[in-house]
Image (cartoon, helix red, strand yellow):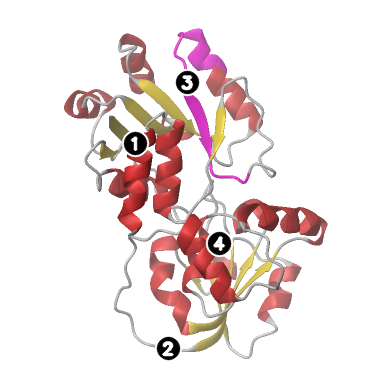
Amino acid sequence: MKILIQNYVNNISSKPAYLNQCINSIDSCSSFLWDMRNISAYDIIDRSSPDVIVAHHAGITNDLVQYLTSEKKIDLIVDVTDMKQHHLNQLEQSLANVNLPIKFLLSETPSNLDKLQSKNKKVNILAGTDLFIGKRKVPDFKVKGCVIGRIKTNSFDQVCSRFESHHRILIRDYNNQGNRQDFDMESNVVSLRTLYENYGEVVLNGDLKYIFSQLFFDAITHSNVLSLKCPPEQSEVFKETLGKIFKESDKEPTLEDIKQQIKDNHTCVDRCAELLLALGEQSASEEVLKVKQ
């Protein structure tokens, strides 16, 4: 199977890149990463001859739709992570008007937090820690706290006040929302990989969709201590979501126990295996899991 993946890597997710790298690590499937800014839909599809296209909802252009309506043999998967309901309704209606089917919708929002309604099949595949992001050389430093968020709130300031020294780091959300002026620096999931270990404690501050993004899995894997701060009204759903992600234990799990669960079940390789399984490629799904070994 050949899979063409639009490159919609952003500040909070490196998913297109890690899926591409995982798929190209096995023999039974191949993948192409499509930079939409530099190559047209017609050129990349002619060049790669894909069986499946994984597209971001904002990447469904007129050219792509025109090509796919003439090439019925190519399946379309649309990533609708954090998409608004009315935008999804409009997209589905526009594709239905030209008789272009969607194989399934893809979302990395935990299923209990995902309120999007659709007549199309929706597959929820969580974010995962990116095993392919390496550490970069940066000046060594040690700071007590690192508070990550996208907007300044009272709870954000309260968390910052706990630390004798701290950095406020802006990571924009899936829709590129964030306010730079209230933060010491702006970063992304790739750059943070190098920084996590320099802080005594890392705090993710935001609503649950923000917290349970790739930030969550990367931060647990690489931080010395990780804390999560969500709005009080989401506290019960927060516990429910954690219960769905991690295996229950008779004893209170340590950070090392949680890190091991991430390593065993919640890496980018596991997510790629889930995607391939959703595509009906069971043997390829089993093959890609061997990349972790």
Q: Quadrant of the N terminus?
A: top left
Residue under circle 1? 283
Residue closer to the observer: 182 or 146? 146
Residue 171 appears in view:
no
Q: Earlier in the sequence, mark 4 or mark 2?
A: 2
What are the residue bounds of the magenta stretch? 93-110
Mark 3 or 4, nearer chain start:
3
| Residue at the front extreme of this rendering | 250
> Which residue shows up at 33% across the image and 38% down it?
284
Magenta span has 265?
Answer: no
Reading the chain from its start, which is encountered first: label 1 or label 4? 4
Amino acid on which the number 1 mark rests in the picture: Ser
Asked if 101 appears above or below 241 in the picture, the reply is: above
Q: Position of residue 71 (x, y in %)?
A: 30, 13
Horizontally, residue 189 falls left or right of residue 120, namely left
* Residue 282 pos. (x, y %): 39, 34
Q: Is residue 50 above or below residue 203?
A: above
Do the residues bearing badges 2 and 3 touch, measured as CB atoms within 8 Å?
no
Question: Which residue in the protein does label 2 denote?
Answer: 141
